[in-house]
Image (cartoon, rainbow, N blue to C red):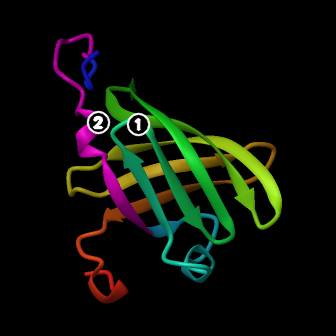
């Protein structure tokens, strides 16, 4: 199976590889950046085997994802399961790649809150600093 799907007009949706890697969460609609970065710099990451993880605030989760299309926009949709402090939590979400190279997305916590977010690709982790 190829890592890209086709739109009805035969244009290819971006291959999964464009989403791969670790992305720094730089904004969340529902939580301030101090909360997002409480335990470590908030991030979301995607790997080539349709999985990944995210961590913001006290929420750390593993992701199962797949490519899709919604309203003529390419997306990577995901379900997730993890912990918020000691409580097990789960949910769903999606991300899309914007023209400026950033991710825009939304995370839903099952039976709880939800938030839009933006993320930028980690360029360098030298000295634990984000460049």
Callout 1 touching callout 2 (CB < 8 Å): yes
Left or right: 31 in relation to 22:
right
Q: Quadrant of the C terminus?
A: bottom left
Residue closest to the eye, 25 or 28: 25
| Residue wearing tag 1 | 76
The residue tagged with tag 1: helix, strand or loop? strand
**Label 1 vs 2, first from the N-terminus:** 2
Separation of residues labelled 1 and 2 (CA atoms): 8 Å
Residue closest to the eye, 22 or 5: 22
Left or right: 10 in relation to 114:
left
Decide: few, some or many residues near mark 2? Use Cα within 10 Å; few <14, some 14-19, many ≥20: many
Left or right: 68 in relation to 34:
left
Residue 57, compared with residue 50, is above or below; it is below
Q: Position of residue 129 (x, y in %)?
A: 33, 86
Q: Please give the label number shown on residue 114.
A: none
Residue 27, compared with residue 83, is above or below; it is below
Q: Please give the label number shown on residue 16.
A: 2
Give the overall secondary structure of the magenta segment: loop
Q: Quadrant of the N terminus?
A: top left
The residue shown at (69%, 70%) is 58
Residue closest to the eye, 35 or 100: 35
The residue tagged with tag 2: helix, strand or loop? helix
The residue shown at (63%, 60%) is 60
Picture quadrant of residue 14: top left
- Magenta region, residue range: 6-25
Residue closest to the eye, 104 or 63: 63
Decide: few, some or many residues near mark 1? Use Cα within 10 Å; few <14, some 14-19, many ≥20: many
């Amino acid at each position: 199976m190829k890592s890209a799907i086709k739109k009805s007009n035969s244009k290819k949706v971006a291959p999964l590889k464009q989403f791969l890697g670790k992305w720094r969460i730089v904004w969340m609609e529902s939580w301030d950046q101090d909360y997002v970065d409480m335990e470590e710099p908030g991030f979301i990451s995607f790997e080539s085997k349709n999985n990944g993880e995210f961590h913001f605030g006290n929420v750390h989760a593993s992701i199962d994802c797949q490519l899709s299309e919604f309203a003529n926009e390419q997306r990577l949709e995901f379900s997730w399961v993890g912990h918020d402090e000691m409580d097990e939590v789960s949910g769903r979400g999606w991300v899309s790649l914007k023209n400026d190279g950033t991710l825009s997305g939304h995370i839903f916590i099952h039976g709880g809150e939800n938030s839009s977010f933006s993320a930028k690709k980690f360029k360098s982790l030298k000295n634990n600093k984000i460049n």
